[in-house]
Structure formats: structure tokens, C-alpha cells
Image (tube, rainbow, N blue to C red):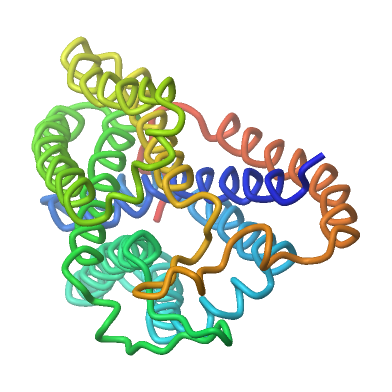
Amino acid sequence: MDLHLIWFILLGVLLTGYAILDGFDLGVGALHLFARTDRERRLMLNSIGPVWDGNEVWLVTGGGALFAAFPDVYATLASGFYLAVYLLIFCLIFRAVAIEFRSKRPGAFWRRSWDVAFCVSSILSAFLFGVVIGNLIWGVPLGADKEFHGTFLGLLNPYALLTGLTVVAVCMMHGSIYVVMKTQGDFHDRVRDWVRNSIIFFVIMYVTLTMATLLYVPHMVQNFKDYPLLFIIPIANLLLIANIPREIYHKKDFLAFLSSCGAMAILMFLFGFGIFPDLVLSNPHPEFSLNIYQDSSSLATLHIMLIIAMIGMPLVVAYTVSIYWIFRGKVSIDDHSY
């Protein structure tokens, strides 16, 4: 049993769960200021209100899994990406505060200020996640001591910025579909226009990022060259993306949302399979890269943590499923609304 590979897959599952679940509420936040009235913005907040904090459990669990299974990778990322991670955590905290504080006072200026804070912090959170992913694909300067030898500005290279914009685009698409699924009436009909525009934005960014990847980071396709049958996976991704506007046109909002979830899951798979077996690619010295076999915990630790994960992950899944089942259906404004 290859425990290193198992933990790489488990880490990918946790981060994919976070990308899908928190992706739509980051997208709702990014679209928040497109709502015209205070009532529409409250509806958007109500759509994610019962679930947004539970969605972030997947990120916390993923971070814990990274720390337990690949401590050297965790230490390198935490130190090398320190400012980026600190800013990301600040944005995640600030958007949570904005959600809770927005309705504490009735004043228009008060609510408008927190609306702007919620929107900006959501966009920045998605963007920074993309910047981190972009740098993991592009590679970062690592030394033989496993230390990061770059700067914060060096992380803002063109490829990472392009990846950041693509993540913002996919979150906006995902979030707009979720809002369509959770709302009704005139606002529901207007949000359908957001879906169309966000899909166009995402497709443009996705095509641009794919071309940049093929031209400038060819190592991301090497594993697909070694296993050509897996080429069917990016084809399936294109079909899922193409199915989203089809389902929206036929007003099958839930199926459109499932297609969006599937597309995001495949995007995470393409990222993970492309960098495998590395977790942090060293650029320009690939021999210093951190991979799942040389930079993991001991086999005993991986085995014990696997037992704990087999107990804990079903609980996380059960909690997530129960919350979404309890708060299923359309949202409305009542005494308990935001």
C-alpha cells in the first residue's frame, strides 16, 4: 500500500471539496455588488449564510492533512508564501466579519461599506488562491535546504496573476449558478444574465491559461503524455463546461450547478496530476523540488493519520450533507435573515 500516494489523493480530495464548496460562496461575494437593492443583497447572503463557515472546514482539514503528511512542504509554503498566506487569511476573516456585521445597524452607509468589504475580500481571496496555485505550477526558487529564496513580488509573476484571474472567473461562474438555483422571481431572472456573462469570462480566462500552460509550463502535460488514455479527462471537462449554458437555457439550475461542480473537480485533478509527484516545484533548480516520497512524514505517522482520517472524513462529509439537506430549497427574507 503506497501511503504517500494515498495521502496525496486524500489531500487532493479535501482541497477539491473546499474549492467546490467555498468556491461558490466566494463567487457570490465577488458578485455581491451587482445586486441592485438591499433586499437582493440580503437574498444573496441568505443563500450562503447557513453553509459558508462549514465550507471552510474543508480548508482547515486540508491544511491539517498537509501539516501531518507532508510537514516539510507545509513549512516551506508557510514561510515562503508568508505574506500571501497572511493576506489570504486576513481576507477570509474580513469577509466573515462583513457577513456578520452588515446587518448590525440599519444605516445605508454602514451596510454599503460592509457590502464593499465583503465583495473585495471575496475577490481577493479567490485571486490569492489562484496566485498560490499558479506559483506551484510555475515553480518557486528553492534551495537545497528546502528554504524559499524568493520575494513576495516574485510570486506575482504573469502566469500566477493569470491563474489568479482564472480562479476568480470560475468562482464567479460557480457562484452565479448557485444564486440562480437558490432564488426566485425577478431577481432570479436577472441573475441568469450574470451566469451567461460569467461563463464567457471564465471560458476566455480558461482558454488563455491553457494556452499559456502549453507554451510556458510543458511539464504540466508530461504525465498525460505518459498516460494518453487520461486525455479523456480534459475532454470531459470541456463537455461539462459546455453543458452549463445548456442546462441554464432549459432552466435545469441544479444540473447546471452539478456540471459546474464537476468542472471544478476536474480542474483540481488536472492541477494535481500535472504536478505529481511534486508538491512544490523548484524553479530554476528542479532537483530541489519537494515531492510526496522524499518530503513526507514517516510511514508510521502516515499509517496512524490514515486511520484518523478514515474516522474523521466521514463525519465531515455527513455534516456537510446534513447542512445542505436541512437548508435546501429557495431562500427568502424573514425575521432570521441577514
- Which x, y percent locates residue 12? 56, 47
* Residue 315 placement, left or right of 251: right
- Work out whether residue 191 can be spotted: yes
Name of the residue lying farthest toward the top = 250
Q: Which picture quadrant has residue 118?
A: bottom left
Residue 258 picture quarter: top left
Q: Examine the rendering and report whether any part of residue 336 can be seen.
A: no
**Residue visible at 59% across and 53% down in the picture:** 58
What residue appears at the point 38 percent right and 33 percent down from the top-left corner?
225
- Rendered location of residue 188, percent (x, y): 20, 30
> Which quarter of the rendering shows the C terminus?
bottom left
State the residue in front, 9 or 41. Answer: 9
| 40 in relation to 146, above or below | above
Q: Residue at x 26, y 27 (%)?
A: 184
The image quarter containing residue 254 is: top left
Q: How many marks?
A: 0
Q: Position of residue 265 (x, y in %)?
A: 44, 36
Q: In the image, 94: left or right of 324?
A: left
Indicate the quadrant containing the N terminus: top left, top right, bottom left or bottom right: top right
Q: Is residue 237 left or right of residue 108?
A: right
Near-viewer residue (79 or 335): 79
Give left or right: position of 294 versus 28: right
The correct choice, above or below, for 253 with respect to 309 in the image is above
Examine the rendered structure and indicate whether residue 338 appears above or below residue 82. above
Q: Nearer the viewer, residue 203 or 47?
A: 203
The location of residue 3, given as percent across then percent down, is: 77, 48
Q: Residue at x 68, y 38 (%)?
A: 317
